[in-house]
């Protein structure tokens, strides 16, 4: 029997399922998200831990007109009543802020407009002239043309979809914190934080058309700086037990992958190299490392493990911290590299300016972005 291909770099759930790529079933996230319902949920996880693929999965589950066969045989399909109630029942607005960066605020703002406009144009067939009154038509056309009030654009688009379908809207925002990191690096942070805060508050706080929203990012930005007044927000970080198995691969899932590809003999070295993370109460592997390691084992004669994760994106923030580190901090980093542990009090919600105010904040950043993991939490009373 021909084996399924490994899903290297595939972040689109529909493509993964249609092209019969190997899929580690994370559809239990849908069940848990709905059973622990919150209007707005923010997941913070390091990069390359499946955030974007999970967001794509949520889109294809909830979206009106979805191909329900995409979920055949998956864990969520066993939840018959839940699927009947929610699968394919909502208009979905899905955007990623990963590409929202620029050398100045005007450039970054244009990129954000372009992203929202592109998503709005996706609904052109259902929000065409014969479906809207002339006033709403003008507002919809303005979003498509990247004109009007950017801060209110997501809220307006959700209202138009709600009016058309008679069903409230699911909003998915991937990599919500990327524009803030880039803005801080390039000197327009205050302008960007105001824009993102106004846009999110309009779409997620004062929006009667909202059914639920999910956001993802690497860092938990201080609620006071970006989610001011958003009382319906539930934040899930890498220290929380809830949802701990839905981002990253569990040990059982890794054993299943290795067995499927006839690589079980490499389980020991796989665990030694890639079982380095602890989310909530679950030990997890980085999916990017595991998938690329399996591909390496299948295609290369030299079977030496590699660090596939480290070079997948910019390490600018870490470099900036390392340059500022004092002798004590550098000695502690060397101890970690040698396999020892250090004890640190971490802050999981910071603004970007606060991140750089204190040298000790390097530990919080290294932890939340996946460079370090925990061996336990001490209660010092």
Image (cartoon, rainbow, N blue to C red):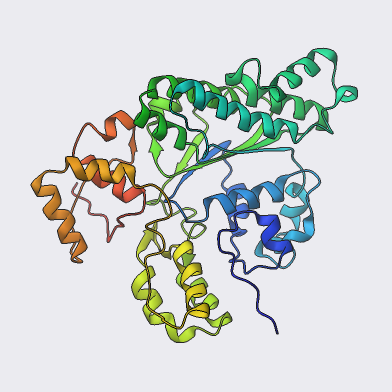
Tell me the residue at 21%/45% (across/down): 322
Estimate the x, y position of residue 329 in percent, counting from the top left: 14, 48
Q: In this image, 362 relative to 157: left or right? A: left
Seen from the viewer's position, the closer of residues 360 and 107 is 107
Residue 332: which quarter of the image?
bottom left
Tell me the residue at 31%/42% (across/down): 317
Estimate the x, y position of residue 269 in percent, counting from the top left: 37, 79
Tell me the residue at 56%/59% (across/down): 9
Query: Can you see residue 177?
Result: no
* On screen, residue 257 above or below 340: below
Seen from the viewer's position, the closer of residues 118 and 45 is 118
Estimate the x, y position of residue 240 in percent, counting from the top left: 41, 51
* On screen, residue 119 above or below 76: above
Residue 29: which quarter of the image?
bottom right
Residue placed farthest to the left in the image? 327
> What count of labels does the image hold?
0
Query: Can you see residue 306?
Result: yes
Tell me the residue at 58%/53% (across/down): 54
Estimate the x, y position of residue 298 in percent, counting from the top left: 52, 79
Q: In this image, 124 relative to 169: left or right? A: right
Quadrant of the frame with the N terminus: bottom right
């Amino acid at each position: 029997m021909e084996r399924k291909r490994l899903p290297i770099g595939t972040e689109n759930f529909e493509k993964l399922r249609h092209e019969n790529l190997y899929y580690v079933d994370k559809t239990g996230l849908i069940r848990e998200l709905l059973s622990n319902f919150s209007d707005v949920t923010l997941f913070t996880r390091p990069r390359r831990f499946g955030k974007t693929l999970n967001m794509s999965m949520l889109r294809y589950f909830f979206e009106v007109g979805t191909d329900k066969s995409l979920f055949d045989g998956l864990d969520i399909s066993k939840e018959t009543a839940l699927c009947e109630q929610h699968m394919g029942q909502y208009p979905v607005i899905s955007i990623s802020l990963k590409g929202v960066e620029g050398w100045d605020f005007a450039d970054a703002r244009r990129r954000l407009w372009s992203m929202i406009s592109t998503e709005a144009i996706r609904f052109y067939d259902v929000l065409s002239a014969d479906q809207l009154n002339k006033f709403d038509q003008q507002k919809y056309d303005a979003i498509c043309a990247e004109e009007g009030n950017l801060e209110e654009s997501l809220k307006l688009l959700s209202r138009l979809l709600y009016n058309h379908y008679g069903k409230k809207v699911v909003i998915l925002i991937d990599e919500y914190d990327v524009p803030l990191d880039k803005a801080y690096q390039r000197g327009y942070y205050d302008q960007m934080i105001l824009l993102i805060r106004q846009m999110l508050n309009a779409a997620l706080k004062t929006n009667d058309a909202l059914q639920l929203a999910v956001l993802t990012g690497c860092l938990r930005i201080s609620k006071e700086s970006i989610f001011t007044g958003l009382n319906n927000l539930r934040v899930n970080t890498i220290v929380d037990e809830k949802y701990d198995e839905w981002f990253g691969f569990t040990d059982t899932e890794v054993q299943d992958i290795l067995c499927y590809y006839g690589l079980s003999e490499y389980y020991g070295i796989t665990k030694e190299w890639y079982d380095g993370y602890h989310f909530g109460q679950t030990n997890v592997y980085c999916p990017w490392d595991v998938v690329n390691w399996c591909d390496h084992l299948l295609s290369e004669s030299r079977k030496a493990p590699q660090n596939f994760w480290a070079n997948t994106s910019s390490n600018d923030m870490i470099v900036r911290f390392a340059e500022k580190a004092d002798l004590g901090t550098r000695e502690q980093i060397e101890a970690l590299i040698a396999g020892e542990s250090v004890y640190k009090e971490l802050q999981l919600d910071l603004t970007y300016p606060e991140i750089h105010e204190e040298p000790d904040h390097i530990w919080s950043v290294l932890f939340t972005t996946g460079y370090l993991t925990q061996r336990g939490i001490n209660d010092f009373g």
